[in-house]
Amino acid sequence: MYFIGYDIGSSAVKAALLDADTGKCVAAAVSPAREMAIQVPHANWAEQDPESWWQEVINATNLLRQQYTFDPMKVKGIGIAYQMHGLVCVDKNQQVLRPSIIWCDSRAVETGNQAFTALGEKYCLQHLLNSPGNFTASKLRWVQENEPEVYARIHKIMLPGDFIAMRLTGDACTTISGLSEGVFWDFSTQSISAALLEHYKIDPSLLADIVPTFGLQGTLCTAAATVLGLAVGTPVTYRAGDQPNNAFSLNVLQPGEAATTAGTSGVVYAVHDQHAFDDRSRVNAFVHVNNTSEHIRNGVLMCLNGTGILNTWLKNIAGNISYDEMNVIASQAPVGAGGLQVFPFGNGAERILENKNIGATVSNLNFNVHGKAHLLRAGQEGIVFALAYGVDIMAGMQLNIHRVRAGHANMFLSPLFQEAFANTMDVVIELYNTDGAQGAARAAGVGAGHYELADAFRGMECIATIQPEPKKKALYQDAYGAWLTALAQKIN
């Protein structure tokens, strides 16, 4: 018996085939080999063609089948993780009406700010736990106001994972967790926010039907089964945004537990048992995957847009060397990079900065002191310091994080990044042999009834633990303090 997990990212689609009995991943694939393009038709916009995600799902599935021979009839569940906050609009024939406005697009910031004022900050924070910001609801309002001919043809709006599920099953549906990440969900009434829809003049019929996060969400239709080489009727049994799913992948399910990732974006995501919010909406609360009416489980998320894109930019200007080579060179510079500071805010409006777009900067550059090693270290430290800034905000919501879990991937492959993260934030890091696609496959097993939650993590191993070191901790926290002082001057 097997389960398949898909992780629909903005850089690539990952797929994993999980052996249900051993809990081991027997095949894994990524498509395309190079990062998918993000279209930027105007400054601070970011779009992708949803059909390109579907094509990469097909390609990744073919790669799985080439790697490992399995009977399609033995696949008993499919799970989907996906890039959060995107907007997909389809017509009555389920055809895409415009490119998806994805997570790092900033065009709807002012739309959300106006709604925050009009609806009232108290209402938004107590009911939505967030400002409408540039989340999915605000993006839809932007389409309504700026592309009325497109809006008039919309039959359903969806998140990226909802779109992939629709291509798999033929049915348009979503989850409560998904509605909360689009800021459509009222946490107080446990229902879709009528006030938000009324303010934005959004017809409730545009929202897809609700299905459970874990459980039957539809079955593989003939068209999808044919192109994927899977069996008609295979159930889709799980769906969640990439950060809630990353937390699930790392068995982060209970209050006080935290997960982190540093890929395309940088995220720290901690589980809370209260409907808590930040007064300035710099970090955001969404319904976590294991939330129930009896036990509140919300995921509090801080996100840094300029993570992977900064690391790639540094890689390119360093002479297109490998990431491993970058890490070795960066480690040759001292903690604090000789005073050189990088502020990684060059990929759109940042929620932790109250939706300001201050751009990325390099500060204190001294031509007589600083070289390649200093710049590469300052880049990694700048990402860590920005994540620490978000964790400090979360501490104000009574989320005191002392241990975090991460997949051994992306920037957590860098020993320098691991060291900077642990010592700046004074946390223990546990690194695991998992990723979002594997997590989605495990969750599909839960949704199919094969696993209980507690049993879903067999086969997952902690491969490294990184502890703070007293002497290094003092050095990193001094550097972080200087970085904070400089940041305050930039944003005030």
Image (cartoon, helix red, strand yellow):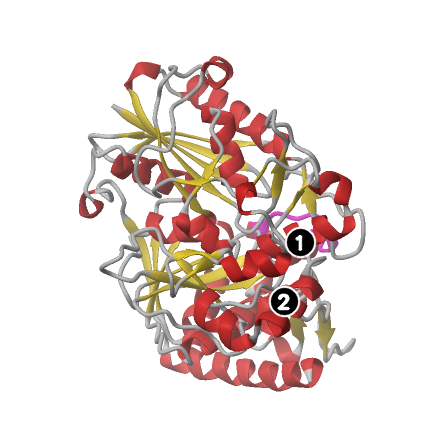
Decide: marks 2, 1 in contact (CB < 8 A)?
yes
Do we see residue 70 in this rendering? no
Residue 489 at what x, y percent from top left? 69, 86
Q: Is residue 320 magenta?
A: yes
The stretch in magenta equals 315-323
Towards the viewer: 433 or 282: 282
Residue 420 at what x, y percent from top left? 48, 70
Towards the viewer: 28 or 93: 93
Towards the viewer: 439 or 179: 179
Q: Which mark is residue 141?
A: 1
Residue 160 at what x, y percent from top left? 54, 41
Q: Which mark is residue 115?
A: 2
Q: Is residue 70 left or right of residue 11?
A: left
Task: Name the quarter where the C terminus is drawn.
Answer: bottom right
> Which residue is pictured at 65% across the width and 84% down the height?
486
In this rendering, the answer to whether 387 lies above or below 67 is: below
The kind of residue on which mark 1 rests is: Arg
> Which residue is pictured at 58% across the width and 33% down the height?
53
In this rendering, the answer to whether 193 lies above or below 222 is: below
Q: Is residue 55 left or right of residue 186?
A: right
Towards the viewer: 467 or 357: 357
Q: Is residue 345 magenta?
A: no
Q: Residues within 10 Å of mark 2 (few under 14, many from 20)?
A: many
> Which residue is pictured at 58% across the width and 52% down the height?
136
* Element under disc 1: helix
The kind of residue on which mark 2 rests is: Ala
Q: Residue furthest right?
A: 42
Q: Which mark is residue 353?
A: none
Upstream in the sequence, badge 2 or badge 1? 2
Q: Is residue 454 left or right of residue 422?
A: left
> Which residue is pictured at 54% across the width and 24% down the height?
59
